[in-house]
Amino acid sequence: MEYREPRPYTFYLLAGLMGLFLLFLYGPMLVIYVLSFQGPNGGVTFPMVGFSTKWFGDILKPGQIANIPASFGRSMLLSSVVTILTVVISIAAGLGFRRRFPGAALLFYLAIASLVMPSLLVGFGIGLGFTLLGLPQGLFTSALGAQLTWTLPFGLLTMFAVIARFNRSYEEAAADLGASPWQRLRYVTLPLLLPGILGVAVGAFTLSYDEYARTTLTIGSYNTLPLELYALISSDSTPTLFAIGTVTTAVSFILITIVLVAIMRLQRSRRMTA
Amino acid sequence: MDPRFDVELVGVTKRYGPGKPAVDDISLRIPKASYCCLLGPSGCGKTSTLRMVAGHETITSGDVLINGSNVTGLPPIKRGTAMMFQNYALFPHLSCADNVAFSLRMRGVGKAERTRTALEFLGLVHMEAYASRLPAQLSGGQQQRVALARALVSRPKVLLLDEPLSALDPFLRVKVREELKRLQRELGISFIHVTHSQDEAMALADMMVVMQDGHIRQAGSPREVFSNPATSFIARFIGGHNVLPREAGLIAVRADRCRLTDAGAGLPAQVEAVEYQGGQVRIVVTTVNGENASVLLPDAEYDADPVEAGMHKHLTWAPEDERRLAA
């Protein structure tokens, strides 16, 4: 038999701590998933009164307080636009910042400063600004701006890290082989940065999709999904809330798995020389 | 008119900032179809010089002429040069064939012709069997050959190689070295090869250019440079020389022209170490003035009169083997 080094007691101590952490993290979520299959006459707490998928069906019915399908559509649309803008701006900024220019450091800190500012204040400021200037508040005006103050700093930081590891000799080789600046970007730089770009896109989408604090003060008349859910929680409670949670988790999980697998495949087949 | 030189540098200077320039007002003429090695320690400006010829580095002042025409401000592709990068810079997301065909694709050549030409050039470096592989699936030596094929596809007049052998193991280095020389002869174009290894430069170069501190210290055939090093730096850098102070200044004497004798003329010296090197034996000595020197003897000659560490001898050489050094 293979000899194994005896483990110190600290190993079991830390393993126990980790177990508790996981229980705290996933325990409540597990409860929600189970309760989302509550029977038609059951409530939002245990015990389960039978088993049904009624609450999943209820998601699609527009209620008096909340219209889940419509707000979901708005959320998807807003998050998609936020993701595209974040990706495009992060790539452009990441490539641009490779060249040192006067004020580069200041500009960088200004761009990421909104990370440390309280979200509610940022949202409040943007809402106030729109009111003062008499601009219409809405999904693709104030809310879009407010969400970008949240996703862009993350996108920029990620992209800077990705581009810092990017070897410029690939671009020089492309130029040497006659690629125009545009061809260089299209055929060499972007394909090589693709794993990082996908990462930025997933991050931006997730941050935007469940953003609450900045959006709530800038959204105008029509809510995104998180705002609609909050309204739902604070008024009436049915297992529909849990069903929404289960569906959202499943969708996010599938989406993230697909992207991670794609990134891993890209990186395994390439193994870039640094 | 057919120009006599493939590459001409006229007063080329590169500054990266205030202070000493990285390349300081160098001029060089590389004759047609020659293998030119830029040799020097790191930081001597050899890579900057190569990159200025390639068009990957702006030229602070001076001119670069290729095949008689001034290319100073032109982008790389308009110069008739192609560069092979130190890490090869093969595009990791493209197969070998697509890597080699890249420049054709950028020019809008059709797919069928692109593939045909790529295979032809992969054949030139004996890599056609690997056409569909990704670079990560190749060994270092194979990657190097694909990079070579990719650079040659654009049919350059001058091929620029930045430390092309440094990533290879010593055994492969010698093999690839022969291959580079063969290709250069067959293609009949000029190669400019940057290296810090004097062995490499000696073995390959028609023209060896020794650089130091942004200056060209000496340019000529390896034989000229080795038998007549201009400065003490060159004599020490290319190796095989003893640099010794005399009344009139520094001199260099080839180690294989030095001998050890028991008495009489010559510089008193103590044997420090004896290294057996196969065909020859290297004897390290310290002269009475405290300089280090070495003597290279054919093994048969050493066996006839062996020495060992600690022995007192006299270091001698023929006066005609002395070379006066500039500095």
Image: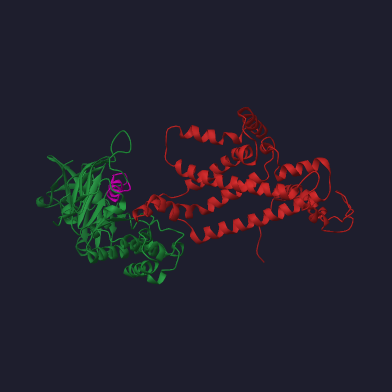
Percent from the top left, x then y, of residue A268?
Answer: 53, 60
Percent from the top left, x then y, of residue A102?
Answer: 42, 32
Colour applied to chain A:
red
The image quadrant where one finds the N terminus of chain B is: bottom left
Q: Is B115 a magenta residue?
A: no
Vertical placement of B95 versus B211: above or below? below
The reply, left or right, for residue B97 in relation to residue B158 is right
**Most frequent secondary structure within the magenta stretch:** helix
Return the residue nearer the eye: B68 or B160: B68
Image quarter for residue A236?
top right
Q: Residue at x 54, y 36 (%)?
A: A111
Residue A222 visible to an observer of this rendering:
yes
The reply, left or right, for residue B206 in relation to residue A132 is left
Q: What segment carries the magenta color?
A: B42-56
Return the residue nearer the eye: A132 or A152: A132
Q: Is B47 a magenta residue?
A: yes
Q: Residue at x 60, y 36 (%)?
A: A115
Return the residue nearer the eye: B255 or A134: A134
Vertical placement of A11 versus B94: above or below? above
Residue B259 visible to an observer of this rendering:
no
Percent from the top left, x then y, of residue B31?
Answer: 17, 55
In this view, the residue farthest toward the left is: B320
Which chain corresponds to the colour green? Answer: B
Percent from the top left, x then y, of residue B32?
Answer: 18, 58
Return the residue nearer the eye: B99 or B235: B99
